[in-house]
Amino acid sequence: MSTIADSIMDAAELRMRGGGFNGFSFREIADDVGIKSSSVHYHFATKEKLAAAVVHRYADRLAERVDRELAGGLDPYDVLTNAFRGTVRSANRMCPVTVLGAGSLGLPEEVAAEVKRFFKMCLDKLVGGGLLPDEAAELLANITGGMVVSAALDDIATYDRATVKLWRSQRAV
Amino acid sequence: MSTIADSIMDAAELRMRGGGFNGFSFREIADDVGIKSSSVHYHFATKEKLAAAVVHRYADRLAERVDRELAGGLDPYDVLTNAFRGTVRSANRMCPVTVLGAGSLGLPEEVAAEVKRFFKMCLDKLVGGGLLPDEAAELLANITGGMVVSAALDDIATYDRATVKLWRSQRAV
DNA sequence: AGCTATCTACCTACCGAGAGATAGATTGGA
DNA sequence: TCCAATCTATCTCTCGGTAGGTAGATAGCT
């Protein structure tokens, strides 16, 4: 895929972290990339398709990382919390799919489907790594909510406090 | 306060559950209530103030409920999970403040402050009910994320699976 | 009682800005 | 020559917000 399409998705992903599907515009993306808004439409016909593509790429990248680390024998708890911790520690400290997921009631069909696929994939990877389905659901909720609460409180330490301690001690027992 | 102002906040709260701050407009709210958009401005000068008022009211209502149930001797775990379970089970199954919180990076100052106050209040109530600060952070993240994931998967059962089982068994030990 | 002033809660009409999207011309490399 | 990629220019729609007016209730004064 061309570099421009990737740059467009990069810009969209970044802006999505702030305001979800309604938090970015073709003109903003175009300015970020250095082209005109009509050229963005050339690569992604509609806003819906652009958002869906961003989520899809994000999911693929996460899946690849998780698969690699699980194959290396790492604990699935660590694999997923660490993967999202990277997002939390980065500049805009919020997973774009989580933002979309929170507002999923008002999302266009195609985007909602990709978001659904993303969360399902996370659960599948955790179960594949040895967790019970309910454990997977709880861990994913913990991570997702940890990002939301830490973003809302503007305190990244909250993510660590919310995701690590009790889970670890429970498993240690 | 007049009934109209409440109706406006009702409509805004409902629509916020779908798309957060960018997910509603003065005209939509006006249509919902049955007045003109300029009349909405009469009650709430700006969109920022309307959103902030909605969050504030939502927080007050939750605080009242939580205080009442804690005073009745209920377990703080149950009190908060049940309070949000009510939201999950209702028609639009998502807490509006969670949606705003997820997109808090792009929120106007006044709204972000109210959202922050909301989550801080939740943590305070839990600690006041006897939880350790880290336990409170984990429970709140669990509840918040449970709502996000269950909304994204369009499956309300996910909220229960994510919030209840392991916490209970851990405390039973 | 009668008049005036003020206030509330709405209205119509409009503004500039920006949205997503489209049509059609242009450019440049294979 | 053809096609991918980008442009300019423009469409219609909706946005948050403002200006100015009006009906009706209330309050204060004489």
Image (cartoon, coloured by chain):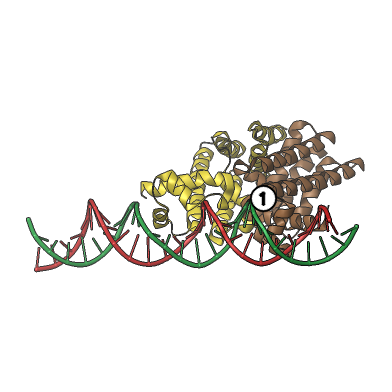
Chain colours: A brown, B yellow, C green, D red
At which x and y percent is residue D1? 84, 56
Residue matched to label 1 = A47
Count the numbered circles shown: 1
At which x and y percent is residue B76? 59, 39
Query: Residue A93 falls in which quadrant of the image?
Result: bottom right
> Which chain letter goes with mark 1?
A
At which x and y percent is residue B27? 46, 51
The residue at 56%/44% (across/down) is: B17
The residue at 73%/54% (across/down) is: A42
Label 1: few (<14), some (14–19) or many (≥20) C-alpha neighbours in 10 Å: some
The residue at 53%/41% (across/down) is: B66
Which residue occupies the extreme right position in the image?
A: A72
Whether residue A68 can be seen here: yes
Left-right relation of D19 to B75: left
Q: Secondary structure at mark 1?
A: helix
Left-right relation of C29 to B94: right
A111 or D11: nearer the viewer:
D11
Query: Residue B135 falls in which quadrant of the image?
Result: top right
At which x and y percent is residue A71? 91, 41
The C terminus of chain B, quarter of image: top right
Vertical placement of residue A146 versus A128, above or below: below
Identified by mark 1, the residue type is: Lys
Whether residue B128 can be seen here: no
C24 or C3: nearer the viewer:
C24
Vertical placement of residue B11 versus B110, above or below: above
